[in-house]
Image (spheres, coloured by chain):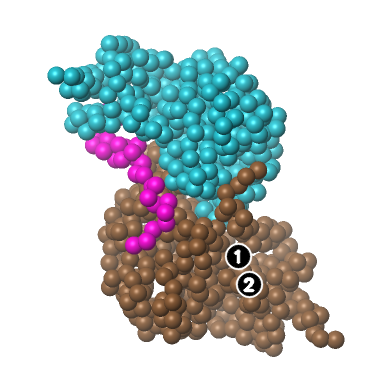
Chain colours: A brown, B cyan
Amino acid sequence: MAFSERIARLKSSLIREILAAAQRPEVMSFAGGLPAEPMLPKVEWADMPASMGQYGMSEGEPALREAIAAEARALGVPCEASQVLIVSGSQQTLDLASKLFIDPGTEVLLEAPTYLAALQAFQLFGADCVTVPLGAEGPDVAALRQRLERHKPAFAYLIPTFQNPSGVRYSEARRDEVAALLDEFGVTLIEDEPYRELVFDAGSATPLVSRLKKASWIYTGTVSKTLLPGLRVGFLIATPDLFPHLLRLKQSADLHTNRIGQWQALQWFGTEAYRGHLAELRDFYRIRRDAMQAQLEEHFADLAEWNVPQGGLFFWLTLKRPVDTRGLLDKALQQNVAFMPGEPFFTDPDANPGHLRLNFSHVAPERLGEGLRHLAAVIREAQAAAQPA
Amino acid sequence: MAFSERIARLKSSLIREILAAAQRPEVMSFAGGLPAEPMLPKVEWADMPASMGQYGMSEGEPALREAIAAEARALGVPCEASQVLIVSGSQQTLDLASKLFIDPGTEVLLEAPTYLAALQAFQLFGADCVTVPLGAEGPDVAALRQRLERHKPAFAYLIPTFQNPSGVRYSEARRDEVAALLDEFGVTLIEDEPYRELVFDAGSATPLVSRLKKASWIYTGTVSKTLLPGLRVGFLIATPDLFPHLLRLKQSADLHTNRIGQWQALQWFGTEAYRGHLAELRDFYRIRRDAMQAQLEEHFADLAEWNVPQGGLFFWLTLKRPVDTRGLLDKALQQNVAFMPGEPFFTDPDANPGHLRLNFSHVAPERLGEGLRHLAAVIREAQAAAQPA
């Protein structure tokens, strides 16, 4: 069988495999980014018009595009509804952007670490990934300038707000510096913001795209983390030079996004009920974040270092004595614990051992301790085995 | 702005543009393949479990995959639920198959004419399209053998049942001959069957894939023509050598298909209610097909030739005196009539002038005559203008 050359680069989605392995009810999963089941809002369908069953527009439902543009403008993003494209979740934006920009060998600029499903999508299309290290305030600015001087990336893919996997939120100053550099070098920005609304402190910083003066951009969001992932409704907002191409690529990919999900999303966007739901979500996840922090202090204080995330869904642990955490997965699953190894979030996994991404939204606080105790034991065992004799 | 090289091949979806132009309520549209609004079934959502809001499996809902496999087996397609992948409509199958097989310059084999959105998807990825002419019984078998002797297509994309745009249904004998040739040359078959259930006579022929003995295959179907296109739920069934790659490509494209649409589709598949709905659909569309045939006889008998379609949604007209029908579109729209020019259904549009695809499912019978009279007048005017002075 002769497949395309890209199939040689097609990786399995490790996270989806772990999720499948974690289906057993006895498994406690820290692996995915799943919303907590009790926080899935009750939704009503009785008022949905029958016309939502008919084919729709590739761009998406006009009223939903308007609502999304209005919310984005309130965040400082200069845009009109005509720049909004409804997609089947943010993953589709990554697919469309890959098609728009990436030939084999095309350079793209990413944070290190970065979202592994983005990395896989870009690599599937043959991207040559240039990375800039991420610190607690955002990307290393000197390193970013150096990369931009030496490379010509087709775009920079950045997750400035509660980055996946690191949990980093770029500071105000760093946001301005990064935006200025992208403008200076004329590099298109893809800004991925699934976690903006899941914030646990009073901090809020406007998106990078609102700070750009010249560079083209795609801003991408989703209702998967704040409403219902099963709807498969996300959106992108793009500058007018990019939008028509993205629209045609969307037509070629699936004609349009499902209208029933779009209708449901529209019932929430911009409403008091949605604001109330988001406030409840924040309170609920803050409690789970705090519970995880307490249990990590108990079981991981001697094993790892981490920052307490101020939003999002994940803790990012750095082992004091690195081992390849991919090798821990089977043993953890034998103990009925699933987690996400850190290596696949790097373009060079082998050179970056010793991180774990732990989701705190999914497991009930009263069960946490047991799972983390088992996980810590698996790590200690591996470290002992790696010890020189 | 440096885009990928494929963007130079990215065409606008003509049909989506015509649909947009036909949004004006005064426009009578023969252009799309839209189900008739009165035949969209009333659906209930009250019993949907809240868990459908959560992330789901990339493969699709297990019960839906089982139901689809059972229906396919009843058609003679040898398959298990593990070979079924739920997708966001058949268009996504074309995207996934393009990614699986097509590099720039990869040969693929198509009918002439063929479904234009398939053609555009394959060409976007750089396919070199080899075509075989379609007659009333199916592809010309001698031509097909010759193509297979001279070329090495990565796959053959065929629509054997009420082909879009031609309405051709391959005969029993031709199905066997085509399947035998694909087996002989070891060419993978992609069989697209959106219209199987929309049949107006007693004729029924099992899918080509059920007749293959060796070749790999992908069989693709959808609920868009029989239930609700707005759900965006379709499926593919693939041989085990292809399935794992298609699954990973699906993960990379959008993680999984929306679960609410899948749940709704499952409420219908294999039920008495669905069989009843399909019977009503057939009766309704048969009446509209007959009404269109009567009005075509009145307004087009001297202008064009056509076969009466025994299923599907379209008449395919061949003008006795060919003109490029793309040039008629603006004039027709000025007369508030939309239709689909035939040229874009060919890999070489300029060499194939003088066909029109007319949908008969959408326009109410009592309005038909007026629209077809206007359309015939536009054609006569263009033919007169093309007349040598």
The amino acid type, in three-letter code, at marker 1 is Gly
Q: Residue furthest right?
A: A389
Q: Is residue A357 left or right of residue A159?
A: right
Residue beneath the point at 79% across and 81% down: A386
Residue beneath the point at 38% across and 22% down: B316
Between residue B284 and residue A384, name the one nearer to us: A384
Residue B388 lies, in percent from the top left, at: 18, 19
Between residue B382 and residue A54, name the one nearer to us: B382
Q: Is residue A319 left or right of residue B332?
A: right
Which quadrant of the figure contains the C terminus of chain B? top left
The amino acid type, in three-letter code, at marker 2 is Pro
Q: Residue furthest front?
A: B150
Instruction: Judge whether residue A377 is colored magenta.
Output: no
Residue A184 visible in the displayed image: yes
Q: Is residue A134 left or right of residue A243?
A: right
Which quadrant of the figure contains the N terminus of chain B? bottom left
> Magenta residues, as a range?
B1-30
Q: Which residue is mark 1?
A: A32
Residue B140 lies, in percent from the top left, at: 52, 20
Which mark sits nearer the N-terminus, 2 or 1? 1
Secondary structure type for disc 2 = helix
Disc 2 residue crowd, few under 14, some 14–19, many 20+, Cα 10 Å: some
Residue B152 lies, in percent from the top left, at: 58, 37
Residue A251 lies, in percent from the top left, at: 40, 45
Residue beneath the point at 73% across and 71% down: A327
Placement of A241 over or under B87, stated as above or below: below
Q: Which residue is mark 2?
A: A349
- Please state the chain letter of the residue tagged with numbered disc 1 in the rendered image: A
Placement of A134 over or under B132, stated as above or below: below
